[in-house]
Image: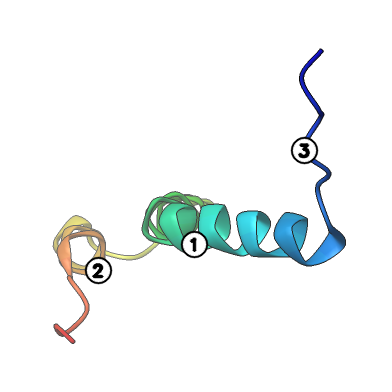
Amino acid sequence: MAKKDTIHPWQQIEEQAFHAFREWPLWLVLRERELAQRTAETQPDAPPAAKADTASQQPAGN
């Protein structure tokens, strides 16, 4: 019978950190969309050109 590998707490933390690091860019995009939607709902008097400019902005590279 094969011996089971034990998972230590530091291994679990390391795995969670790895997944969080990989998912961070996706989370940022989703959060930006959510904030843009909320801003559009709270400020309906803004001209359409201003809304399009803020939605299409990309952050500066690394």
Disc 2 target residue:
54
Disc 1 target residue:
39
Rendered-image quadrant of the N terminus:
top right
Disc 2 packing (10 Å; few <14; some 14–19; many ≥20) = few
Considering only order in the chain, which callout, 1 or 3, is on the residue closer to the N terminus?
Answer: 3
The amino acid at mark 3 is Asp
Q: Residue at x 81, y 30 (%)?
A: 4
Determine whether label 2 and label 1 are within 8 Å by CB: yes
Observer-side mark, 3 or 1, equals: 3
Give x and y (percent) for residue 16.
Answer: 66, 56
Give x and y (percent) for residue 11.
Answer: 72, 59
Give x and y (percent) for residue 8.
Answer: 83, 57
Q: Is residue 40 visible?
A: no
Q: In terms of depth relative to the viewer, which is nearer, 37 or 19? A: 19
Disc 3 target residue:
5
- Type of colouring: rainbow
Q: CA distance from mark 3 to mark 2?
A: 50 Å
Q: Residue at x 83, y 44 (%)?
A: 6
The amino acid at mark 2 is Thr
In the structure shown, which secondary structural element does the residue marked by tag 1 occupy? Answer: helix
In the structure shown, which secondary structural element does the residue marked by tag 2 occupy? Answer: helix
Q: Can you say whether 1 is above or below 56 in the image? A: above
